[in-house]
């Protein structure tokens, strides 16, 4: 059984996004950003190279553009279903299929009337080797809302220098004197101290307004009247927002102070956000990684704090990383083990004590991790995985940890070989918690409750059979492995090689990691300044398991994780004393 995902926000999910999207409830997500694989029909589209991604790549290319559009369309249909009425979608694509995507998918599913923008993002510089055509340096991001009423927060950027020079040419000083900037001040963009810079805006109504044709302080009204009522005019005057010409025949103008402006409104051409380059600190080794500024602008514009942001092609994890930083809830989906695990490590690296937790959903789960994790977290999680609703209370709940949607109780035991005493106590708790439901389930020959555990002993199984046969009471025993598949996590060993000291006194050390797993090893991650229970990787994605690092004299703790093809991980922690030679403890 699979649980509803609406309550399980802040979650990374490994799997086919079509199937996972079908499990999301209608009208449950505020914003969707997707950067699906482009219609390039090239092998470089396979980025991670693991089994899930290769399989998906082959599915998309079994039948040209029509097949690609059909593949993407059925996923966007599910996205439309799960969006809230006030929600929006931003679909990132390039020139290969942009017109097909807009006409055949977005217009048909969202409606042409809900098209808001085609955002053009200049992601790259021009290429010197483009001799037969203009270089393709832009991507498109289609912005559609679900309905005519949607969330949108205007975004601002710095004013263009030309705008400042041509428009904001007036200065007002503390004593109230006003003058124009000198040619030199304007050219150098130098503003004298204690001076406010402003421009002048027209206050005339664009249409005839007989009721707004009034004289103000001896100045006549424009031909079609003022744009503002007398009350508003007086308010603006009191706020020092009016500019009065020396001659009464002149026209009153509105002062717009530069220090009160949010900046220039962002339009649909985004040429102020650079692509990720080699020296960028955001770089994680994902070839099509999008810059955080790009996603920050989209998420800020189309959602509010506390909203749910979904990325069904999570890739390198930029969407969820940004959503988490600016207090949105999030769901990230990908069919690649490496994409999900690299994103998990990226999230762990940026989180602190105030960050909200997140859940990782894989194909398989490690027994040790589940068996020994926080009891309350495990109980809530496994109840939801089974399709139930977890109990938020930890006291006065009769020892029950959740309920099915019809109210039938669920109890979770994070143990093996559950005995008969658990059955006896559970039966008593169920009767006390809701006697009417208990009797109803017996009458309808339905389970009066469910017990979830890692395994059950002979005594418990025998008592379940007796209750059913002798008293007509059905209690269903469910093992954790019936709900989610369990596997063994990979093992890892690390060899340490002293490469000697340099002139600065730092010692170079080579680490060679070897992981073993029946599922096969995917990659390694390294934390060279490890703190207890806080793995924050300096190197997220290492396909080989071989790294060199320089250390100053002293004590150092290094941690390396190995991730296998099931997404399970093992960790080795190395403690070194570096002082002329290295000692490993």
Image (spheres, rainbow, N blue to C red):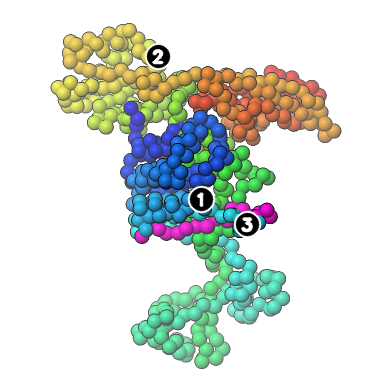
Mark 3 and mark 1 lie on one chain; the one further toward the N terminus is 1
How busy is the neighbourhood of tag 3: few (under 14 within 10 Å), some, or many (20 plus)?
A: few
How busy is the neighbourhood of tag 2: few (under 14 within 10 Å), some, or many (20 plus)?
A: few
Q: Is residue 486 above or below residue 153?
A: above
Q: Is residue 143 above or below residue 571?
A: below
Tell me the magenta residue range.
113-130
Mark 2 and mark 1 lie on one chain; the one further toward the N terminus is 1
Q: Nearer the viewer, mark 3 or mark 1?
A: 3
With 13 as the anchor, is 573 left or right in this view? Answer: right
Q: Is residue 194 above or below residue 403?
A: below
Q: Position of residue 243 (x, y in %)?
A: 53, 81
Work out which quarter of the rendered image holds the C terminus and state it.
top right
Q: Is residue 166 visible?
A: yes
Q: Residue at x 53, y 31 (%)?
A: 50
Query: Which residue is outermost to the left?
Result: 443
Q: Position of residue 496 (x, y in %)?
A: 71, 21
Contact, mark 3 vs mark 1 (Cβ under 8 Å)? no
Classify mark 3: helix, strand or loop. loop
Query: Which residue is outermost to the right?
Result: 503
Contact, mark 2 vs mark 1 (Cβ under 8 Å)? no
| Nearer to us in this view, 120 or 401 | 120
- The disc at residue 416 is 2
Mark 2 and mark 3 lie on one chain; the one further toward the N terminus is 3
Q: Is residue 125 magenta?
A: yes
List the residue tagged with mark 3: 132
């Amino acid at each position: 059984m699979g649980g509803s995902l609406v309550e399980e926000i802040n979650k990374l999910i490994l799997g086919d996004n079509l199937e996972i999207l079908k499990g999301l409830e209608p009208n449950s997500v505020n914003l969707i950003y997707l950067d699906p694989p482009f219609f390039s029909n090239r092998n470089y589209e396979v980025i991670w190279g693991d089994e899930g991604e290769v399989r998906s790549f082959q599915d998309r290319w079994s039948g040209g553009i029509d097949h690609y559009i059909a593949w993407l369309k059925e996923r966007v249909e599910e996205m439309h279903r799960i969006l809230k009425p006030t929600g929006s979608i931003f679909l990132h694509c390039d020139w290969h299929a942009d017109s097909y995507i807009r006409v055949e998918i977005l217009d048909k599913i969202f409606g042409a009337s809900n098209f808001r923008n085609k955002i053009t993002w200049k992601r790259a510089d021009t290429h010197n080797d483009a001799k037969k055509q203009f270089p393709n340096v832009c991507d498109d991001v289609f912005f559609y809302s679900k309905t005519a009423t949607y969330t949108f927060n205007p975004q601002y950027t710095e004013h263009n220098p030309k705008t400042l020079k041509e428009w904001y040419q007036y200065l007002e000083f503390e004593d109230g004197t006003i003058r124009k900037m000198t040619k030199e001040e304007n050219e150098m963009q130098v503003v004298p101290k204690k001076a406010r810079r402003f421009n002048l805006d027209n206050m005339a109504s664009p249409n005839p307004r007989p009721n707004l044709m009034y004289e103000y302080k001896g100045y006549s009204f424009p031909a079609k009247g003022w744009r503002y009522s007398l009350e508003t005019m007086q308010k603006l005057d009191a706020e020092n927002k009016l500019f009065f010409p020396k001659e009464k025949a002149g026209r009153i103008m509105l002062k717009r102070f530069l220090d009160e402006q949010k900046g220039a409104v962002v339009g649909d051409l985004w040429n102020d956000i650079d692509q990720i380059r080699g020296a960028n600190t955001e770089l994680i080794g994902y070839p099509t990684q999008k810059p955080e500024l790009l996603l920050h602008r989209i998420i800020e514009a189309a959602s509010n704090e506390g909203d749910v942001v979904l990325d069904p092609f999570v890739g390198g994890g930029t969407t969820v990383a940004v959503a988490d930083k600016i207090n949105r809830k999030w769901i990230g989906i990908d069919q690649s083990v490496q994409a999900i695990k690299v994103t998990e490590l990226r999230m762990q690296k940026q989180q602190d004590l105030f960050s909200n937790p997140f859940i990782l959903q894989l194909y398989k789960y490690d027994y040790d991790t589940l068996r020994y994790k926080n009891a309350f977290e495990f109980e809530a999680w496994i109840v939801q995985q089974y399709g139930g609703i977890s109990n938020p209370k930890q006291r006065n709940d009769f020892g029950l940890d959740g309920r099915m949607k019809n109210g039938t109780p669920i109890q979770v035991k994070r143990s093996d070989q559950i005995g008969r005493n658990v059955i006896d106590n559970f039966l008593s708790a169920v009767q006390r918690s809701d006697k009417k439901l208990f009797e109803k389930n017996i009458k309808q020959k339905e389970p009066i409750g469910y017990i979830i555990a890692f395994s059950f002993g002979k005594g418990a199984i025998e008592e379940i059979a007796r209750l059913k046969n002798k008293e007509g009471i059905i209690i269903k025993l469910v093992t954790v492995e019936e709900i989610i598949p369990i596997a063994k996590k990979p093992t890892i060993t690390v060899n340490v090689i002293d490469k000697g000291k340099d002139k600065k006194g730092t010692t170079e050390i080579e680490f060679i990691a070897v992981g073993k797993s029946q599922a096969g090893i995917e990659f390694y991650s390294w934390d060279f300044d490890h703190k207890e229970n806080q793995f924050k990787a300096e190197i997220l994605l290492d396909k080989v398991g071989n790294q060199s690092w320089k250390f100053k004299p002293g004590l150092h703790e290094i941690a390396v994780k190995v991730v296998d093809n099931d997404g399970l991980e093992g960790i080795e922690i190395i403690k070194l004393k570096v002082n002329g030679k290295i000692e490993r403890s």
